Amino acid sequence: MTSAESTNIFTHSWSLYDLITEYNYMFHQEIYTGVGQLLKLRDDVGRYRLLDLGCGNARYLSPCLKQSPPILYEGIDLSEAALAEARGYLAGLPDPVVTLTRGDLLEAVEATDKTWDVIFTGFAVHHLMSADKARFFQAAGRCLAEKGWLILVDVVREENQSRENYLMDYLMDYLNYMRDNWNKIPPDQLEEACTHVHDHDYPEYFSTLKEMAAAGGLKASRIVSRYGQHYTLLFARSSLPQI
């Protein structure tokens, strides 16, 4: 399965994901507050280069970037509608800084010929199958600067929980939670979201992600925050900041 296939719901119906995040059903407010604090810890604010893979409309990352501006930002996403919105959210950054490109995140990180100080990806990598996740970490390790960071916001599976058990236990409870509590989402769109989660979410254990990252040269890793199954993870070559 390609990442384009697994993200089809958001490519053609971006407003659904935007609606979910607007009501903070996936803890975007808390998560991106933490991401903003993390970027402030870098010693190259104003000089760092950031690659945003699966950038969407950059609604939540853009305030972080305005507080800790990069010298170069490149956002990659499959949704033209999301990219069009991103131009508005990123408008406060100087024009030469921002590049937005329609494309597949795995293809983009494997093809880039730039060196990046920060690679960021939010709720996207879990759509990749395990072999493609390994490719992602290999590519990220290749193009990160020596003191670069990979910031990965995503869903993560409990240790020793098979995907089958994940589907039977946590995911079914989560789908019921969505249906019971995401009451501001129109019913037809809510069922579309539930079907997407059931069919296209392939979260890994944190230990598996650590192994993949280490194989790509990113030996240091840390859980920055966790809200239910929603994690912020930080990877680097050798050392991480005190948080």
Image (spheres, rainbow, N blue to C red):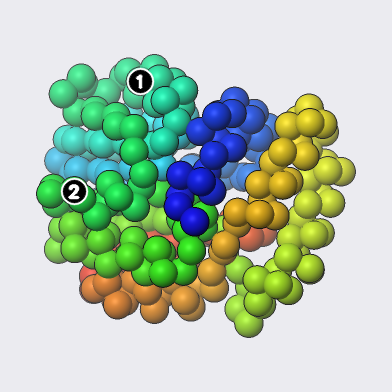
Quick check: can you spot residue 124? yes
- Which disc, if any, is residue 112? 2
Mark 2 is surrounded, within 10 Å at the Cα level, by few (under 14), some (14 to 19) or many (20 or more) other residues, namely some
Q: Is residue 138 left or right of residue 225?
A: left
User: Front-most of 218 and 195?
Assistant: 195
Residue 52: where, in percent of width, then height?
33, 42
Quick check: can you spot residue 220? no
Q: CA distance from mark 2 to mark 1?
A: 21 Å
Q: Is residue 117 left or right of residue 17?
A: left
Residue pictured at 45% horizontal, 52% vertical: 2
The answer to whether the residues at label 2 and label 1 have Cβ atoms under 8 Å apart is: no
Q: Amino acid at mark 1?
A: Arg
Q: Amino acid at mark 2?
A: Thr
Check the image and name the residue furthest to the bottom. 160
Mark 1 sits on what residue? 87
Question: Tag 1 or tag 2, which sits nearer the N-term?
Answer: 1
Residue pictured at 65% horizontal, 34% vertical: 20
Residue 42: where, in percent of width, then height?
25, 51
Residue pictured at 42% horizontal, 25% vertical: 80
As displayed, is residue 73 above or below residue 238? above
Quadrant of the rendered image containing residue 72? top left
Quadrant of the rendered image containing residue 77? top left
Q: Quadrant of the C terminus?
A: bottom left
Residue 240: where, in percent of width, then height?
30, 67
User: Front-most of 203 and 149?
Assistant: 203
Residue pictured at 76% horizontal, 55% vertical: 174
